[in-house]
Amino acid sequence: QMRSVKAKYSKTEVLAKCRSTDFVKFYIRLYSEQEGILVEVQKVYGDSMSFFRDSRAILDAAEGRAVSKPEEEEPLYLRLPVSQMEFIKDATLPPLTFEEESESVNIAAELLASHRSDSNMLGMESLVTLIDPLKSLRSSAVIAAKRVLCPEDTGHDSFNLHNYVMSLIIYNNGSAEAATLDGTAMENHYAQLRNLAISSVANAIALLLEEETLWESIRSSRTWYGDVLVPALVRDIAMAEECPHEACYASRCLTSLASMSESTLFASKIREAGGMMALKIAHEVGTREYALLAQDAGKCHQTILRCR
């Protein structure tokens, strides 16, 4: 519950199949030994750094040691934006043009436009990283965020990044594809793509809200956001029992949309779509099983209550 890991328990053996917030899949097995219980944590796929954190916490708990909360852990790599690091403060760097700052976003778009599934996954992972100002230049992060949120952005000439990402959220829940791919390397491909898509939108909305350019960026598409995206995100939140991590990102999206001072449109649309009941359900699920979900759903609920 503390680390918001989704787990399914086997009925035939002492086994838990787990998935972390970073979409790392791993198994936990228990073995009976003369001296006690042996705990095995085995990674199936995903980021090794993320797996290290969760497996270390699980093994610490098994040995009776104190386990730190995820938010109390320091990053294993970047602990502040590169632009604020000491070595670069005195460095003289040539200014980047808009085209140069956009190049990394264009590369991600090319990967997403590919017909290869591995390229699509790499493109989505790159996009999530690009929108994070801790891991990329803030100016580049803003460019990427606008490409994701603005259907009419001038960077969509060769490939519409907005349409691709939003289609993953609106139309692709991965259920039909996953049913035909059980037991293969592609079993979780579509679900992970969609997870990354919701994550990228949540980060993009939060970044532009912080930059005070969110309303300006989505104003021309506000009707689509209110009538199409908001109901889709509310459905994700209502399915928190089945997809808790997607519900977390969906809650963050709605929190940022409802926080805009320029308009109360989205708070009203969230209520009309049944968002308050969905958030209540998600908060209950989070309180019982996923701490991060309880936090995000609770914050979203309070934000909407303040929008009168």
Image: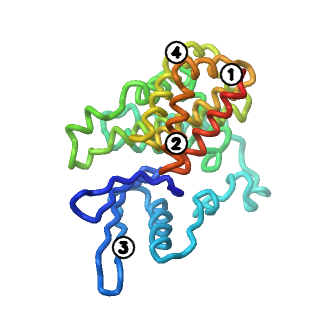
Residues 281 and 155: in front is: 281
Q: Position of residue 291 (x, y in %)?
A: 55, 51
What residue is shown with label 3?
39
Q: Nearer the viewer, residue 34 or 270?
A: 34
Q: Is residue 152 visible?
A: no
Mark 3–mark 4 CB contact (< 8 Å)? no
Please tell me which residue is depicted at 34% across the width and 86% down the height of the picture. 35
Going from the N terminus, do you reach mark 1 or mark 2 first? 1
Alpha-carbon distance for marks 3 and 4?
Answer: 48 Å
Residue 250 percent location from the top left of the image = 52, 34
- Name which of mark 3 and mark 4 comes first in the sequence: 3
Q: Between disc 2 and disc 4, whose residue precedes?
A: 4
Circle 2 — which element? helix
Q: Which residue is disc 1 drawn over?
A: 215
Residue corresponding to mark 4? 227
Q: Are marks 4 and 1 in contact (CB under 8 Å)?
A: no
Give residue 284's mark.
2
Point 56% across, 26% down: residue: 149
Determine the image quadrant of residue 253: top right
Q: Vertically, is 292 above or below 238?
A: below
Which residue is depicted at the point 29% across and 82% down?
Answer: 33
Residue 238: image tag: none
N-term mark: 2 or 3:
3
Q: Badge 4: few (under 14), some or many (20 or more) residues near its Cα, within 10 Å?
A: some
